[in-house]
Image (spheres, grey):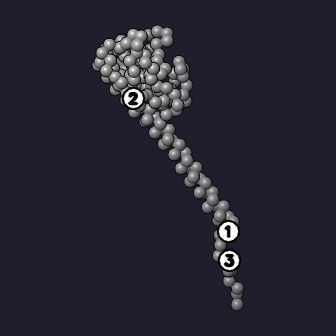
Amino acid sequence: MKKENQNKGFTLIELLVVIAIIGILATIVMVSLNNSREKAKISKSQADLKQIRTAIALLENDTGEWPGHKTIGDVEIDVPNNEMWDLNVKEAGLIINDDSPAYLNWGGPYINTISKDPWGNNYFFDTDYQIDLGAGTANASIIGSFGPNGVGPNLYDSDDIIEIMAVE
C-alpha cells in the first residue's frame, strides 16, 4: 500500500504569497487613508474660511469696515504691511473691539474664536493678494490659509486655500 501524505499545512511559498498580498493591500489602504485625511483638512479649512467670512460680513454690517479698519470692497495694490496674520487680535474686530480706534457701532463678538488651520497656521486677511483668473492675474482682498505646505507669510503659492472677498 502506498502511504498517503499526512502533511496538510501551507507551504512556505504559499505563506509568503499571502503575506505579500496582505502587505500590498495594507499599502493601498494607507495611501488612500492619507489622501482622504488631506482632503478632509482642505474641506475643514474651506468651511472655516466661510465661517470667518460670515463673521466679517457681520462686522461690515455693524461698523461699515473690514478687519484692520479697512474699507469694504477695497483692494489695495502694493501697500506694504497690509496683511493681518492673526484674525484673533483686537485690531481685526471679530472677537473683541479694537480700542485704538474703536470700531463704531461694534456689536460683536462676531465669532467666538478663530482656530488655527488644520496644518497649525493662522488664517490671514490680505487686501492685495494676487489671484490667477486663467487669463492673467488680478489683485484681490481675501481671507486665507497657507494650505498643506504651510508656506508663509508673504510666500504665497498654489496650495493656498482662499475665500475671495473682492477683486480689482
Image x and y of residue 82, in percent: 46, 13
Residue at coordinates 43% horizontally, 28% vertically from top-left?
Answer: 114
User: What is the count of numbered marks?
Assistant: 3
Q: Quadrant of the N terminus?
A: bottom right
The mark that comes first in sequence, 3 or 2, is 3
Label 1 crowd bin: few (<14), some (14–19), many (20+), radius 10 Å: few
Residue at coordinates 51% horizontally, 21% vertically from top-left?
Answer: 156
Label 2, label 1: how many angstroms apart (C-alpha)? 63 Å
Which amino acid type is marked by label 1? Thr
Image x and y of residue 33, in percent: 51, 45
Which mark is drawn over residue 108? none
Residue at coordinates 63% horizontally, 59% vertically from top-left?
Answer: 19
- For marks 3 and 2, give the one nearer the viewer: 2
Which amino acid type is marked by label 2? Asn
The mark that comes first in sequence, 2 or 1, is 1
- For marks 2 and 1, give the one nearer the viewer: 2
Residue at coordinates 52% horizontally, 31% vertically from top-left?
Answer: 120
Residue tagged 3: 7
Q: Is residue 77 left or right of residue 119?
A: left
Label 1, label 3: how many angstroms apart (C-alpha)? 10 Å
Which amino acid type is marked by label 3? Asn
Residue tagged 1: 11
Label 3, label 2: how many angstroms apart (C-alpha)? 70 Å
Q: Quadrant of the C terminus?
A: top left
Image x and y of residue 60, in percent: 32, 18
Image x and y of residue 115, in percent: 46, 30
Q: Secondary structure at mark 1?
A: loop
Q: Secondary structure at mark 2?
A: loop
Residue tagged 2: 112
> Along the line of sight, which residue is nearer the eye, 112 or 167?
112
Label 3 crowd bin: few (<14), some (14–19), many (20+), radius 10 Å: few
